[in-house]
Structure formats: C-alpha cells, structure tokens
Amino acid sequence: MGSECSFKSEEVVLISNSEKYLSVREVEESDALVKAAVSFDPSIEEFQKSIDSIVSVDPYNLLLRQYNELDFGADKDNAYIVYSNLAGKVRRINCLESLLYTQQVKRMINAGTDLFTSPAEFMSYVVRKGKLLKVYFYTIDQAAIGNPKDIISYVKKDIDNGWNLLFNLHNHNFFPFKKLFLGATVPSANDINAYRSESKGMGLRKALVTNGFHTIEVYEEDFYILKGTRD
C-alpha cells in the first residue's frame, strides 16, 4: 500500500472482547485519504485475487448477477435501481476504505481463517470537527454485524459535542460457497431503513457500501429512491 495511504495516528481500542471490537482514530483530513486506492496491502491483494479468480468483479456485472440471483423483493429492486444508474454513484475503492477493509481482512487472518472462506462484516462511522476526523471501526467478525448500538452510541455523543457526521460505511461480503454469491455494491433494504433513521436522528447525508474493489456512495435523496423493507 502506498506510503501516502496510511493512518498517521494510533488506534484507540474502545471495546475488545470475544464478541465485539470497536476502535477509533483521530486523523487529519487529507486528499490522500479520499484518492482512489492504487495499491493494497498484500493481505487484501490475496483476498482480491481469490475473488477475481472466480467472478468478474466489474461492479455492474455483480449488480446484474445479484439481481438475477434474488427471486423478488426490495433487495432485488435495489440492485436494478443501482444497475440502471437511478441512484447512487459507484466508483473504485478509495484509500480510507481500503485501510478499513484491510483491517478486517487481517483480523480474520489473525483468527486463523480469511475473509474469502469466512466472510465478515465491518462498519465504520466518520465524524469531523474542523479538519480533524474521527474514524470508528466496529466488527463482530461474523457475516452480519447485527445491532451496531455500541458504535452508534459513541457517534451520537460526538454529534452532541459538536462533531458532524460525514458518512457511515460497511462492507458487503462475497459468499463464494453459497447459492447467493452476492458482493454487489448496493444497499440492502435493511440498510435503507437504517439510513433513513440516521438521516432523521443523526444528520446522515451520505452512506457508503464497499466490497473491497468498488464502493457506492449513496446520498440522502437516494435513501428514498432505493427501497426499504416496508416500501
């Protein structure tokens, strides 16, 4: 990974036990963090090669594949909406996102497995005050993250103390050994439910979903173009 694409501060661990892990870093806002990632840590490169060897990771190929895999419902509709460029903006993964993705990849390696065979979800919130960012990282090292109340609690305290919520980010896993391969950069109906709630309660204006190759940026107006579970 390029020397410019790195965290320049120490990670502060807030929660670490057998069930969950939550940390935060304070970093200076910089152009380098939002540039498209051009090189990667060897651990994430190995994961990317494993996925790339069995499927085309072109984001629109994955969106179409996911649309065809799903029988019906809001998740299928959302894949079509993004595939048709009706909501969201798909781009290459950037530096900050790749650093957080690499952190999850390494956690799985340290646990004696890898993200290819043991998909695991992580979540991040980024808040800003002036030119200072707080970058939160949360995971339970499982395929679905469940209720992220711990990380949200810290973020809400920051908002109450004058920090502004820039975005939330989570990854969508590939499932190479299951019928539903997934891995597309599109918010699920449950994601949209959460975005709408956080828009009202936390001032969320942008949300990101990454798969380790590409990322979708979803803006507040997209929260109501894409479908939630009750639409």
Image: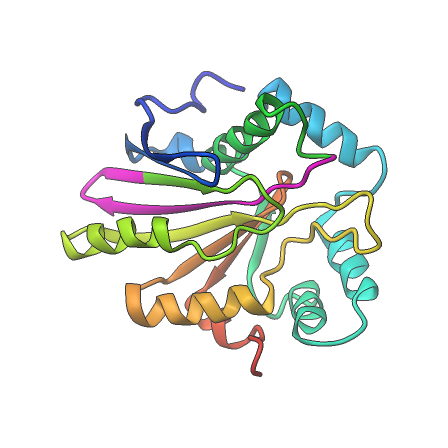
| Residue 135 x/y as whole percent | 34, 39
Residue under the point 54% across and 76% down: 225
In this rendered view, identify the residue nearer to me: 23 or 84: 23
> From the image, which quarter does the N terminus lie in?
top right
> From the image, which quarter does the C terminus lie in?
bottom right
* Residue furthest out toward the bottom: 231
Q: Is residue 127 magenta?
A: yes
Q: Say left or right for 77 vs 155.
A: right
In this rendered view, identify the residue nearer to me: 168 or 131: 168
The image shows residue 183, relative to residue 116, as above or below, that is: below
- The residues colored magenta run 117-134
| Residue 102 x/y as whole percent | 55, 29
The count of marks equals 0
Q: In which image quadrant can residue 56 be found?
A: top right
| Residue 29 x/y as whole percent | 30, 35
Q: Say left or right for 21 vs 69.
A: left
Dominant secondary-structure state across the stretch colored magenta: strand
Q: Is residue 53 magenta?
A: no
The image shows residue 38, relative to residue 55, as above or below, that is: above
Q: In which image quadrant can residue 37 be found?
A: top right
| Residue 61 x/y as whole percent | 79, 53
Residue under the point 62% across and 38% down: 212
Q: Say left or right for 203 vs 219.
A: left
Residue under the point 35% across and 62% down: 204
The image shows residue 225, relative to residue 67, as above or below, that is: below
